[in-house]
């Protein structure tokens, strides 16, 4: 998920509270004036209030940011100068209502810089990041505004607040304290300077990653270079060469939908090595080298944490999570790590045995794992990805995620044309609730392109809330599937299907939100809870209820044969040692790099190796994200927080058992509790309290180990 905390430098809960509502409203007079100046600040008279992307130009964003920041400051100044006694409504409620223009401009801008950027937007991004950081610092460190918040916080037990309001007061107060509100003037100035510099270099980090990914490809120049690839992969490689104007028969890019199938199926070991080494070198070479930035980022984060009273940045970050402390997170990861690494070593033995039959006498390398894992999977389970992919056509899988949401939550999707979008490939759907009322808009952007960051994510262009009107959300998913040539289908691996269900789970978290205050909307929850709803949705992708209905051959429309389906499901625990270990190595590295209390090493490669060697990572497995392209942590959003995926995995495997225990994956009672306590409640509850309200107890790690087939 990529939910941008666009006022970089503070915790998400605080920033969303500061920013206020994402309401696309203005007075008639204001709209008339603004429409002559900047379309970003005008009323958007479009279907469902979707941003009119075709009207926006890169030159519009900087003045829109400056104007909306000034407006936001005036709104907050009115709160802090109000001579009436501080109340929930005239302080916390007023802050929630403030900043609507800044929110709408920022949501559009940071969406475009991720999904469809260009050099002009990147130039604005580099310049505006520091301005946004300074704006946020001026708010969190405003003594008058904080005085109002503190007054409400200190009297909160006597204000007759409902639970959501109580949590909002406490989260807002804590966010301001974490932003430096209680520091002396000198420390405040330094924290603001740190946040400003971090904002600048984190933008540079992300741009370097995009530059490295977009500029690299491995050309396929002869028929022999395509050896092992199926027809759809050959077609995609040729289409990519045409799209990028490369003089070759085809190319393999650093989009996961391009290089992962190549590493899996190509019989050209030399080309597999080139592709993987190209991926591993992103952010670590030439003018796009992120390694000097990493050292500076970690040092600045550590310094900030110490100014705020914490020994390390990890301690600062986890103070505002379910885990509470870095050691709690490490304890959980190390327990899973021991089982996953032991399982991976057993998997390696099986892969080496298979590779020897191909003449690989020196043992498999990291670029061989994908290939031989697939061969062993075929031999052990008789499952061939090339055989299963024709049953997972993108259009049918979109139908599947919509059906699944309908069965669980009673909602339905209606495709709509002529909805404004940022690219012609985008599709749009109206979403109706179980009372047949329009409740949301969902947009999907599924194909890779050079202007798009890699990966898959969800975010929003407008958040649900009821503070000022009944505001419905506009939610989108972005993926990076390779676009086939005209007339050919988009065929997905089962991993791709699982990713689609995952990201759509985030989208449902936004669409089903049922809260009053915008900073508690949808996915505005603690970082190590936010992946739980999405990861839980992955489980339905593997159910017969979905596969028997939607896994249909794209040519014949025949349902996937039961024998093939059984083999596919039986194979799901295969290679889980590798999958879990390559993820955990990144999560552990992220945590260890941010647990540092002294100066960060300048040799980032040696630092990475030292950490991974200490935990015993075997050379045949490479870390999922090397530091140079580890955007989750060094761009900001998941710093000292990448562990949250495995933390959430503990929750989701235990939670899905609630359905399995009933014998019905769509049990109405369990689904109703899931919707009420997890998907609809947003940030109105403590996450563990929300989980217990759904499940009736706390989770344990045993369900995860059993689900993945991991053991020491």
Image (cartoon, grey):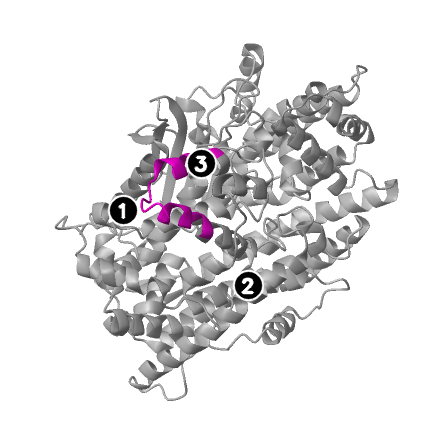
| Residue 378 visible, this angle | yes
CA gap, disc 2 to disc 1?
Answer: 32 Å
Asked where in the image residue 569 lies, by quadrant, the reply is: bottom left
CA gap, disc 2 to disc 3?
Answer: 34 Å
The kind of secondary structure the magenta stretch mainly shows is helix
Q: Which residues are magenta?
A: 654-676
Left/right placement of residue 124 relative to residue 150 reads left
Q: Earlier in the sequence, mark 2 or mark 1?
A: 1
Vertical side of 468 occupied by 624: above or below: below
Q: Nearer the viewer, mark 2 or mark 1?
A: 1
Label 1: how many Cα within 10 Å (few below 14, some 14–19, many 20+):
some
> Residue 398's spot in the image, x, y percent?
30, 42
| Residue 627 visible, this angle | no
> Residue 220's spot in the image, x, y percent?
31, 68
Asked where in the image residue 167 lies, by quadrant, the reply is: top right
Vertical side of 245 occupied by 103: above or below: above
Mark 1 — residue? Answer: 546
Label 2: how many Cα within 10 Å (few below 14, some 14–19, many 20+):
many
Left/right placement of residue 454 relative to residue 186 reads left
Q: Secondary structure at mark 3?
A: helix
Q: Among all residues in the image, which is located at the extreme left?
A: 556
Q: Earlier in the sequence, mark 2 or mark 3?
A: 2
Q: Secondary structure at mark 1?
A: helix
> Residue 16's spot in the image, x, y percent?
62, 34
Left/right placement of residue 531 relative to residue 81 reads left
Residue 487 drawn in magenta: no
Q: Nearer the viewer, mark 3 or mark 1?
A: 3
Q: Marks 2 and 3: CB-CB under 8 Å?
A: no
Tag of residue 586: 2
> Residue 578's spot in the image, x, y percent?
44, 69
Mark 3 — residue? Answer: 673
């Amino acid at each position: 998920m990529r939910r941008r905390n666009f006022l970089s430098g503070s915790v998400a809960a605080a920033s969303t509270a500061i920013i206020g509502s994402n309401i696309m409203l203005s007075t008639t007079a204001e709209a008339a004036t603004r429409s002559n100046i900047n379309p970003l600040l005008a009323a958007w008279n479009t279907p469902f209030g979707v941003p009119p992307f075709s009207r926006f130009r890169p030159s519009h964003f900087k003045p829109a940011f400056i104007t909306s920041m000034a407006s936001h400051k005036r709104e907050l100044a009115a709160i802090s100068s109000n001579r009436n006694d501080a109340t929930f409504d005239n302080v916390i409620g007023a802050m929630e209502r403030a900043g609507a223009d800044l929110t709408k401009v920022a949501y559009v801008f940071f969406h475009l810089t991720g999904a469809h950027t260009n050099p002009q937007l990147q130039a604005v991004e580099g310049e505006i990041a520091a301005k946004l950081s300074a704006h946020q610092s001026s708010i969190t460190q405003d003594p008058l505004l904080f005085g109002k918040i503190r007054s409400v916080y200190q009297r909160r037990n006597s204000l007759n607040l409902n639970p959501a309001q109580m949590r909002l007061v406490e989260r807002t107060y804590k966010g301001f304290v974490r932003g430096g509100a209680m520091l002396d003037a000198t420390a405040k100035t330094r924290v603001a300077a740190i946040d400003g510099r971090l904002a600048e270099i984190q933008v540079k980090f992300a741009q370097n990653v995009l530059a490295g990914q977009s500029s690299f490809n491995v050309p396929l120049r002869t028929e022999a270079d395509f050896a092992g690839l199926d027809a759809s992969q050959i077609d995609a490689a040729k289409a990519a060469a045409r799209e990028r104007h490369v003089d070759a028969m085809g190319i393999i890019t650093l989009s996961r939908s391009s290089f992962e199938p190549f590493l899996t199926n190509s019989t050209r070991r030399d080309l597999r090595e080139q592709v993987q080494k190209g991926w591993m070198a992103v952010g670590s070479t030439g003018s796009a080298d992120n390694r000097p930035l990493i050292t500076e980022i970690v040092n600045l984060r550590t310094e900030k944490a110490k100014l705020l009273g914490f020994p390390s940045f990890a301690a600062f970050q986890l103070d505002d999570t379910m885990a509470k402390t870095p050691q709690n997170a490490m304890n959980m990861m190390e327990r899973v790590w021991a089982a996953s690494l032991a399982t991976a070593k057993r998997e390696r033995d099986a892969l080496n045995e298979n590779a020897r039959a191909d003449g690989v006498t020196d043992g498999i390398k990291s670029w061989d794992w994908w290939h031989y894992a697939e061969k062993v999977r075929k031999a052990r389970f008789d499952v061939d990805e090339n055989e299963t992919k024709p049953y997972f056509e993108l259009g049918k899988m979109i139908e599947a995620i919509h059906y699944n949401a309908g069965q669980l939550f009673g909602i339905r999707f209606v495709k709509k044309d002529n909805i404004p979008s940022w690219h012609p490939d985008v599709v749009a759907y109206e979403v109706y609730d179980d009372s047949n009322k329009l409740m949301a808009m969902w947009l999907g952007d599924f194909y890779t392109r050079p202007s798009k960051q890699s990966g898959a994510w969800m975010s929003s262009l407008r958040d649900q809330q009821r503070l000022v009107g009944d505001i419905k959300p506009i939610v989108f998913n972005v993926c990076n599937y390779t676009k086939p040539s005209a007339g050919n289908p988009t065929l997905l691996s089962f991993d791709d299907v699982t990713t689609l269900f995952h990201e759509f789970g985030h989208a449902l978290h936004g669409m089903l939100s049922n809260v009053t205050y915008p900073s508690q909307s949808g996915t505005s929850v603690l970082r190590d809870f936010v992946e739980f709803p999405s990861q839980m949705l992955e489980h339905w992708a593997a159910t017969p209820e979905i596969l028997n209905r939607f896994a249909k051959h794209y040519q014949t429309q025949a349902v996937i044969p039961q024998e093939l389906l059984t083999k596919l499901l039986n194979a799901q625990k295969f290679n889980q040692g590798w999958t879990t270990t390559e993820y955990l190595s990144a999560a552990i590295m992220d945590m260890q790099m941010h647990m540092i209390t002294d100066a960060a090493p300048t040799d980032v490669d040696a630092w990475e190796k030292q950490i991974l060697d200490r935990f015993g990572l075997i050379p045949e497995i490479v870390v999922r994200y090397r530091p140079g392209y580890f955007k989750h942590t060094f761009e900001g959003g998941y710093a000292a927080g990448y562990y949250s995926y495995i933390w959430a995995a503990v929750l989701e495997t235990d939670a899905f058992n609630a359905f399995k225990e009933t014998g019905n994956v769509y049990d109405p009672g369990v689904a109703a509790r899931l919707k009420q306590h997890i998907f609809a409640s947003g940030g109105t509850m403590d996450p563990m309290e929300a989980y217990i309200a759904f499940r009736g107890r706390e989770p344990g790690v045993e369900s995860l180990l059993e689900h993945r087939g991991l053991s020491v």
